[in-house]
Image: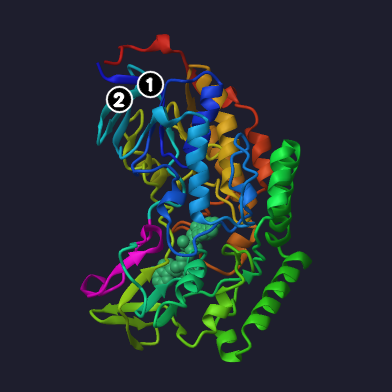
């Protein structure tokens, strides 16, 4: 007999761990959490580049069910966040449900037995419910640049950092100037001999104002849980204010742009460099970055900002102006492939279609970012249009988990109505149409090749939590287990 569980969760990051806690509390205790890595932590396990830290307050990088008064900094570092997740697993006793080094090869819906049949690198199982908790920013984006295969030195991606490569005294090119780049550049600039920052589009950067959290404050939060809760709430509302201020044209966005320009002028006195790194699109169109040490790093004598990477040679890189630079190491800080979620090509629905094909056909949509027609009892955390430009996606996962928990606990088979899904997506597209992400004069990874914004939720995290508070069975075709035509073996 193949092993059977009520719910199979793929991924042991914030979403997977949060889902497991919630399901257990709702009485769904028969779980398998499959994780292809050797440790839990998801993005916070995979991204170990120097300088990696959250860029939204630490307070929002914790699960509401597992409050953490102990954050040592306003913006905690990667290791601290990963350690937090390991402790949550311990505290909630999830270790026995987690299967590390276990990658899903295929998961297909058996519409006769009403189960998911799942093959992994460590054997097969069946499950009533399949939950994708693989994260939205998972697969590194490796740009196809001519000559990359001929380069004689190490090439690595920020999300797959090779700690065996010693950068001390080396000539290094960093490709990209997004959220990962602006953290890694200041962290490695002091140790390398020369650093090329290969910039295609300059980012908007606001002051970060990171600071240590004093011991007395951490003790106060630990002693008074409602205070901890209130501070988390305050942090999330502060982020919502930022969203409301930049998403649409108006005085608040102008104020934000002025703040960012002042930050740039203060930190970059050199007018030529300042001109090079001044953005020429509306603030917020791409993710607004926060840093106190990015511009100072660019001012260093060993750092040069070049135009975008055009070509790679065996000994170095050629920029878009045709200038060749000899380098020893190339670092891709080029972000993630969001258009091909990791599990999508392995999940096969009721009609034998993969999720990837379904996404290709429907423009990458999901009802409430969570369920997809043709895929019964499948729930996707951090699915289409659940990303954020302003706050922590942990809040979005939590809302999705609140939504799917009662549906799964009911023991019924739910499949979303395709018309509901289409209507929901039309509404999302309408809400997004006038936002800075669509109108701000930039191209970003938020959009697919047709310009559809497949990534972002158009509203506040509180607004999303509100619509996700209640599972809406009326949007679903519902079947009972007794309707199965054969039993899973
Ligand atoms: P990203 O924001 O997508 O930035 C990628 C950078 O690489 C951009 O500057 C992009 O330039 C450049 N690029 C991409 N393809 C290129 C190509 N073919 N040639 C030249 N340049 C290329 O990726 P990321 O910095 O890894 O951040 C991704 C997301 O992860 C963030 O938005 C954020 O949500 C999350 N993140 C969070 C944290 C945190 O909390 N601390 C840290 C890192 C990342 P263009 O702008 O011209 O496309």
Mark 2 sits on what residue?
125
Alpha-carbon neighbours of circle 2 within 10 Å: few (<14), some, or many (≥20)? many
Per the rendered image, the range of residues in magenta is 140-161
* 341 to 486, vertically: above or below: below
* 193 to 464, vertically: above or below: below
Visible residue check, residue 445: no
- Does the magenta-highlighted stretch encompass residue 143? yes
Answer with mark 2 or mark 1, whichever residue precedes in sequence.
1
- Disc on res. 5: 1
Residue 423: x and y in percent read: 57, 38
- Which residue lies most toward the right here? 251
Q: Residue at x 57, y 79 (%)?
A: 296
Q: Coloured how?
A: rainbow
Q: Quadrant of the N terminus?
A: top left
Alpha-carbon neighbours of circle 1 within 10 Å: few (<14), some, or many (≥20)? some
- Does the magenta-highlighted stretch encompass residue 253? no
Give me the C-alpha separation between circle 2 and circle 1: 8 Å
Q: Secondary structure at mark 2?
A: strand
Residue 96: x and y in percent read: 40, 27
Residue 107 versus residue 437: which sits nearer the camera? 107
Residue 435: x and y in percent read: 64, 58
Task: Name the image quarter holding residue 2.
Answer: top left
* 128 to 187, vertically: above or below: above
Q: Residue at x 57, y 55 (%)?
A: 76
Residue 268 versus residue 411: which sits nearer the camera? 268
Q: Is mark 2 within 8 Å of ligand 1?
A: no
Q: Are marks 2 and 1 in contact (CB under 8 Å)?
A: yes
Visible residue check, residue 395: yes
Residue 205 versus residue 358: which sits nearer the camera? 205
Residue 245 located left or right of residue 188: right
């Amino acid at each position: 007999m193949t092993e059977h569980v009520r719910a199979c969760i793929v991924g042991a990051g914030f979403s997977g761990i949060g889902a497991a806690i919630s399901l257990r509390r709702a009485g769904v205790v028969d779980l398998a959490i499959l994780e292809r890595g050797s440790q839990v932590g998801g993005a916070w396990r995979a991204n170990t580049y120097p300088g990696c830290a959250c860029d939204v307050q630490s307070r929002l990088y914790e699960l509401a069910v597992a409050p953490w008064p102990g954050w040592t900094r306003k913006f905690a570092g990667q290791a601290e966040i990963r350690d937090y997740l390991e402790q949550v697993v311990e505290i909630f006793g999830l270790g026995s449900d987690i299967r590390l080094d276990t990658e899903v090869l295929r998961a297909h819906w058996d519409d006769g037995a009403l189960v998911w049949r799942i093959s992994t690198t460590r054997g097969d199982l069946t499950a009533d419910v399949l939950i994708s908790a693989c994260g939205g920013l998972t697969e590194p984006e490796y740009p196809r640049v001519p000559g990359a295969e001929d380069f004689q030195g190490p090439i690595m991606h920020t999300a797959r950092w090779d700690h065996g490569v010693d950068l001390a005294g080396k000539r290094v090119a960093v490709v990209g100037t997004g959220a990962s780049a602006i953290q890694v550049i200041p962290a490695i600039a002091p140790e390398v001999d020369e650093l090329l920052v290969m910039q295609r589009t300059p980012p908007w950067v606001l002051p970060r104002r990171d600071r240590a959290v004093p011991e007395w404050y951490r003790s106060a939060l630990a002693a008074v849980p409602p205070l901890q809760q209130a501070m988390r709430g305050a942090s999330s509302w502060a982020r919502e204010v930022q969203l409301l201020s930049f998403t649409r044209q108006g005085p608040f966005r102008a104020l934000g742009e002025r703040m960012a320009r002042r930050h740039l002028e203060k930190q970059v006195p050199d007018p030529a460099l300042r001109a090079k790194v001044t953005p020429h699109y509306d603030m917020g169109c791409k993710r607004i970055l926060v840093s106190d040490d990015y511009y100072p790093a660019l001012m260093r004598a060993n750092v040069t900002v070049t135009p975008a990477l055009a070509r790679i040679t065996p000994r170095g890189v050629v920029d878009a102006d045709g200038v060749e630079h000899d380098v020893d190491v190339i670092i891709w800080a080029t972000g993630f492939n969001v258009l091909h979620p990791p599990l999508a090509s392995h999940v096969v629905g009721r009609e034998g279609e993969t999720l990837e094909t379904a996404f290709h056909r429907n423009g990458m949509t999901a009802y409430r970012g969570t369920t997809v027609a043709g895929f019964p009892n499948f729930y996707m955390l951090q699915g289409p249009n659940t990303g954020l430009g302003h706050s922590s996606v942990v809040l979005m996962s939590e809302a999705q988990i609140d939504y799917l928990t009662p549906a799964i606990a009911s023991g019924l088979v739910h499949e979303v109505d395709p018309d509901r899904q289409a209507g929901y997506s039309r509404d999302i597209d309408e809400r997004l149409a006038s936002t800075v992400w669509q109108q701000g004069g930039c191209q970003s990874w938020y959009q697919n090749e047709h310009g559809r914004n497949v990534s972002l939720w158009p509203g506040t995290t509180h607004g999303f939590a509100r619509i996700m508070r209640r599972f809406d069975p009326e949007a679903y075709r519902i079947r009972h287990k007794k309707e199965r035509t054969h039993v899973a073996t």
